[in-house]
Image (tube, rainbow, N blue to C red):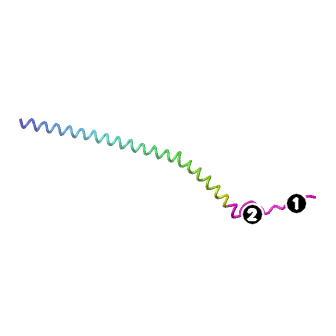
Amino acid sequence: MPASVSSLDSTSRSDYSYDDDDDDDEYRLAQQEWEESLAQLQQLVTVVLLPFFGKFLGRRWSHWAYARYLKVGLGLPFFFGERRSIPAR
């Protein structure tokens, strides 16, 4: 009878190692899916969100820069001189 108990232990251990391999495969598959999801999220940010925010911030910066440009006095009169009105005859 002791021989049969030891044989049961050896088969049950091999079953556990087989289950461990399945768990490892499931873990690897879950890890691969997670990495693919992160790659898709990175592509979304790169292709959609960054250009949108860049456009938004660029427009805000240009309005601020143009207002600053005029405040400093670098408008048309700076480059082309003051316009003088010709008196009507």
Q: Is residue 88 above or below residue 45?
A: below
| In front of the other: 87 or 34 | 87
The x, y position of residue 15, in whole percent, is 20, 37
In space, the residues marked 2 and 1 are separated at their CA atoms by 20 Å
Three-letter amino acid code at the position of disc 1: Ile
| Label 1 secondary element | loop
Q: Nearer the viewer, mark 2 or mark 1?
A: 1
Task: Locate residue 57 relative to residue 89 in the image: left or right.
Answer: left
Say how many tags the image has: 2
The x, y position of residue 55, in whole percent, is 59, 50
The x, y position of residue 29, in whole percent, is 35, 40
Q: Is residue 46 above or below residue 79?
A: above
Check residue 3 in the rendering and tell me which mark sits there, or answer none. none
Residue depicted at 49% across the width and 44% down the height:
44
Residue under numbered circle 2: 78
Q: Is residue 3 magenta?
A: no
Check residue 86 in the rendering and tell me which mark sits there, or answer none. 1
Magenta residues (range) = 69-89
